[in-house]
Amino acid sequence: MKVLLSLLIVILSTSILSGQETKIITGRIISEDIEPIPKAIIHNMDTIALGSTGVDGYFKIEVPAETKELLLGFIGMEWISVKIREDCQNLEIIMMVDVIYDFISIKRINKKRYKRFKGLAKRHLQAYERGIFKSRTPCISYVFEKY
C-alpha cells in the first residue's frame, strides 16, 4: 500500500510540474534585402535557444504560453528583439544587416540605425507584394535598442 501511495505521489507531482502550457509558433525570418536567413537562432529573453530557421528561413518552435518577446540572432545581422501580439501564431520577421560605422559618434550611429529600423515596415510590405510574406502587416512589433 505504501509503495502504491508513493508511486501515485510521484506520478501526480511530475504531471503537475510538466503541465506548463506551451504554444507552437511558426514563421519566417528574412534580411533587409528580402532574402531568407538560414540557421538564424531564436532565443527567449533569458537567452535560451528555442530553435533555428531552416535553409529557407522558416521555423517552427514550441514556447511557453506566456512568452511575449523573442530575441533573434545570426552572424552578420544585428540581434533583434520582437514583441509578439497575443493573437499571433505566425511571425514574419525582418533582420537588419550589421553595419560597421567607422569614426562616427555613437549618437550618429544610432540615428543611422534608427532610420533603417523605421524602414522595416516598408520592407515587410515589399516582401508581402513579392509573395515572401503571407500577411500585409507584421504580427509583431520590433524593439529598437540603442548602442
Image (cartoon, rainbow, N blue to C red):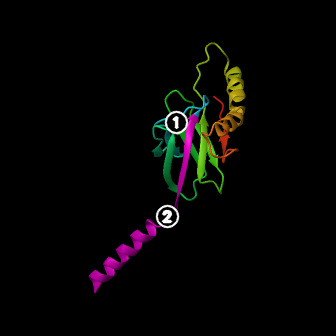
Task: Determine contact: label 2, label 1, CB under 8 Å.
Answer: no
Q: In the rendered image of this protein, does residue 13 appear above or below residue 25?
A: below
Q: Quadrant of the C terminus?
A: top right
Are there few (<14), some (14-19), or many (20+) residues within 10 Å of tag 1? some
Q: Which quarter of the picture shows residue 98?
A: top right
Q: x, y percentage for residue 90?
A: 59, 50
Q: Residue at x 71, y 20 (%)?
A: 108
Range covered by the magenta-colored residues? 1-30
Location of residue 101 in the rendering, given as x and y in whole percent from the top left corner: 62, 17
Instruction: Tell me the tag on residue 73.
Output: 1
6 and 91: which is toward the camera? 91
- Does the image show residue 147? yes
Looking at the image, can residue 144 be seen? no
Crowd rating for badge 2 (residues with CA inside 10 Å; few <14, some 14–19, many 20+): few
Q: Amino acid at mark 1?
A: Gly
Q: Quadrant of the N terminus?
A: bottom left
39 part of magenta stretch: no
Query: Disc 2 vs disc 1: which is toward the camera?
Result: 1
Q: Is residue 23 above or below residue 49?
A: below
Residue occupying the point 62% across, 40% down: 131
Which residue is identified by label 2? 20
Where does residue 31 sit, x and y in percent of width and height? 58, 32
Disc 2 marks a residue whose amino acid type is Gln
